[in-house]
Image: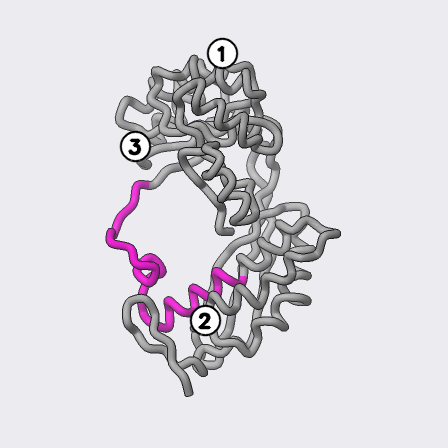
Amino acid sequence: MSATTDPLGATIDRGALRIERIETIALRAPLARRFVGSAYSMTHRSTIITRLYTSDGVVGEVYNGDTDAEQALILDIIHEELAPRVIGRSASDPEGAWAAMEPSTNDILRDRALALQAIACLDTAIWDVLARAVGLPLHRLWGSVTDSLPLSVIGGYYHLDPSETQRVVAGYAERFSGMKFKVGGKTPAEDAERVRLAREAAGPEFVLMVDANQGYSLAEAVEFARRAAELDIRWFEEPCRWTNDRRWMRDVRSQSGMPVAAGQSEVTLGGLRDLIVEGAIDVSNFDAS
C-alpha cells in the first residue's frame, strides 16, 4: 500500500483517511440591523457547515459558502455532483480531490462561482481532516514560520452617523490591529471626510484600509484617493465599478499613488493572474472560500 509524505515530513498511508460521508448544515441568521455598503445592503448572513467523515474516524468540520440567496444550489452541487467524486478517495490527497471536483465548474448555464463555493466547502474540510490526522494546525502544515498575525475587522457601514462611526472605530482600535472601512456609497468628498473621522478616532498607529465594493467611477476613485492621501490608507479595495475594470484600477494606482487591492470578486486563478500581470493591483485578497 503506497504512502504520501506531508510538507513537514509526516508519512500517511494512502489507504488511510478514506472519505466515507459528507454532511452539510446550512445556516442563515438575521442581523440586528441592515448593514449598508456602497451599492448593497445586508439583512442576513449565511454560511454552510461542512462535516467530512473518514474511515479512520477523523472528522473535518469547517464553514464556507456565504452566498445568501443561492445556498440551496450550492448544497445541491455538493451532494449531487461533488460527493460522488470524492467519497472513497483519501483525504491525504487534497489536490487530487480538488482536481476530481473541478469539472463541476464547466457548466456554462449557471454561475461558475457557485460550483467553486461548493468545491471550497469540501476542499477546506479535506485539508482540515489532513491537519487533524497529522496533529498540526493548518498554518503549520502549509509551512508558516510565525505564531501570530495582526487581526483586522470590517466596519464603517453607512447606517452609522459620524459620532457613532468614531465611537465604533475607537472601540475597534482597542481590540484590533486595523480595519477595512466602507466607502464608495457617497461622494468622494463625503467619504474622505468619513475616513478622516475614522483616522481621528483610531489614532496614527491603527491600520486603515478602505473598500469601495466597486462603487466609484474611475474619476471618483481618483478624487477620493487624492482627498484621502494624508490619512495613511494601507490600501484602496475594489475602487472601480462594476466589474473591477483592470485598466481603471491600474489608472487609480498611477494617478493617485494609493495602493489598490482586489481579487475577492475573482473566481479563477486566470482572472487573478490578469490583475497582477496588467498592473491593476498592489494587494491580492483572493477569497479561498
Q: Nearer the viewer, residue 106 or 205?
A: 106
Q: How far is the residue under mark 1 from the one under mark 2?
A: 52 Å
Return the disc, 1 or 2, that comes first in the chain's sequence: 2
Amino acid type for the residue under numbered disc 1: Ala
Q: Which residue corresponds to mark 3? A: 174
- Where is residue 267? Give x, y as percent: 57, 47
Residue at position x 31%, y 35% from top? 177
Q: Are marks 3 and 2 in contact (CB under 8 Å)?
A: no
Q: Nearer the viewer, residue 12 or 252?
A: 252
Residue at position x 57%, y 30% from top? 245
Placement of the N terminus among the 4 image quadrants: bottom left
Residue 206 among magenta residues: no
- Where is residue 237? Give x, y as percent: 47, 31
Q: Which residue corresponds to mark 1? A: 189
Amino acid type for the residue under numbered disc 3: Glu
SS label for mark 1? helix
- Where is residue 232? Give x, y as percent: 33, 22
Write down the region rendered in magenta: 122-150
- Give the number of the mark in front: 3 or 2: 2
Q: Which residue corresponds to mark 2? A: 93
